Image (cartoon, rainbow, N blue to C red):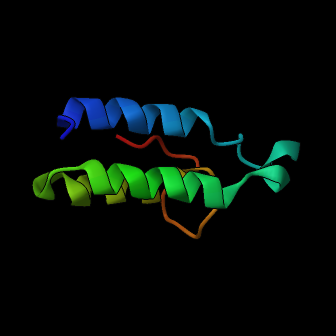
Amino acid sequence: MPTRAQLDASLDALHASLPPLRSANAEMFDYEAFQRQADDLVGQARPADKAHVRERVNCLLGSAGLIPSDNEDEPCA
């Protein structure tokens, strides 16, 4: 099982795949592929890290404006 640092590195890479908010590429974003990758990370995470991964994924999607969120335009830690 990956460490939290390894999970965070994978989440950072996943974040890099998100289109910029309100960009022309946002319409072509493959949400299902993103969700599969996110689900894989949750599945790999230790029980103690699963909530962290889910929270980061939700924050990433919210900050990108892809789901309703209070985090729009805010960085995800």
Left or right: 16 with respect to 76? Answer: right
Q: Quadrant of residue 68?
A: bottom right
The answer to whether residue 65 is seen in the rendering is no
Which quadrant of the figure has residue 61? bottom right
Residue in the picture at 20% in, 37% down: 4
Residue 45 location (% of width, % of height): 23, 50
Toward which corner of the image does residue 16 lie, by quadrant? top right
Nearer to the camera, 42 or 26: 42
The residue positioned farthest toward the right in the image shown: 24
Where is residue 28 drawn, in percent x and y?
A: 83, 51
Q: Is residue 45 above or below residue 70?
A: above
Quadrant containing the C terminus is: top left
Q: Nearer the viewer, residue 19 or 45?
A: 45
Q: Is residue 44 visible?
A: yes
67 lies left or right of 14: right
| Left or right side of 53 for 62 | right
In the image, what residue occupies the spot 18% across and 41% down?
1
Residue at the bottom extreme?
68
Query: Can you say whether 55 is above or below 37 in the image?
Result: below
Q: Nearer the viewer, residue 54 or 45?
A: 45
Image location of residue 21, percent across then percent down: 71, 47
Say above or below: 26 vs 11. Answer: below
